[in-house]
Amino acid sequence: MSVPARAYLSIGEVLSKLRGDFPDVTISKIRFLEAEGLIDPQRTPSGYRKFTSIDLDRLRYVLAAQRDQYLPLRVIKENLDAIDRGLVPPTTPGASATPRLAAVDGELTASHFSQESELRLSRSELLESAGLSEDQLAELESFGLISMKGRFYDADALSVGRAVAEMSAFGIEARHLRSFKSAADREVGLVEQVITPLLRQKGSEAAARAEEVQNELASISVRLHAALVRTGLHRSK
């Protein structure tokens, strides 16, 4: 989707917005931070910088981190990378970044200060955040319960990892959970049967409707699964 022209700010307008909180900031400083890779504004065909609200937020973060925490640019750049991957930067030296996630009705939702970015965790970050051992993760991957997307693990991998780590306290291992994966695959197949005709229709409305139906069926499926497990446990009493 194209962004309206006035959604962009010139470097002079950015300077004006920053001066209230950071009176010492200059255009040269903004250009220096760009050269260091901390911001990456777009350019007009004639070469003028076009800053977005995200660029402005990043500049505020950088300037505040320098002024209030005396962080070197190397550390600030690492923190920005963590934020871009859906993580909360560490507040103490040597600590690890943690996923910026909150549980809402059992669902993990990402939150971040600047933009719509999916959670992306390295292997070591996933192990630490989920509370898994290397052997547990390797076993989960061998059974297809967790997989990488490109070079990172996403929020779904973290959800699965955390659930498995919690279940391991009861002596349940990854190999015991293959039936969960098989059941989930069958549920996915059922949802796909419903939405495939919608996806074959032309137009953005059909695609939006397919996504809406998919999300609704997924939510119903989770509730049904939970109800069936409760019913089965009640019968066993």
Image: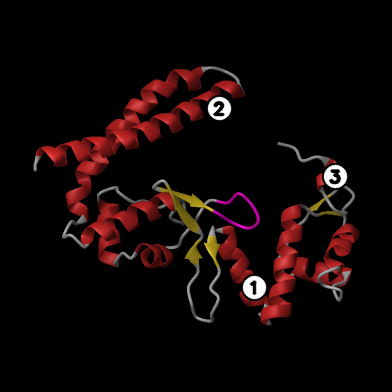
Ranked by sequence position, the earlier of labels 2 and 3 is 3
Does the segment drawn in magenta span residue 226?
no
Magenta span includes 113 = yes
Residue that badge 3 annotates? 6
Kindly identify which numbered label has been placed on residue 66: none
The amino acid type of the residue labelled 3 equals Arg
What secondary structure is marked by label 2? helix
Q: Measured along the vertical axis of the image, is residue 220 above or below residue 95?
A: above
Snapshot quadrant of residue 136: bottom left
Secondary structure mostly seen in magenta is: loop
Q: Write the start and end of the magenta stretch as one range.
A: 111-117
Q: Residue at x 27, y 39 (%)?
A: 226
- Give residue 76's mark: 1
Q: Quadrant of the C terminus?
A: top left
Which three-letter amino acid code belongs to the residue tagged 1? Ile
Q: Nearer the viewer, residue 88 or 48?
A: 88
Say which residue label 2 marks. 208
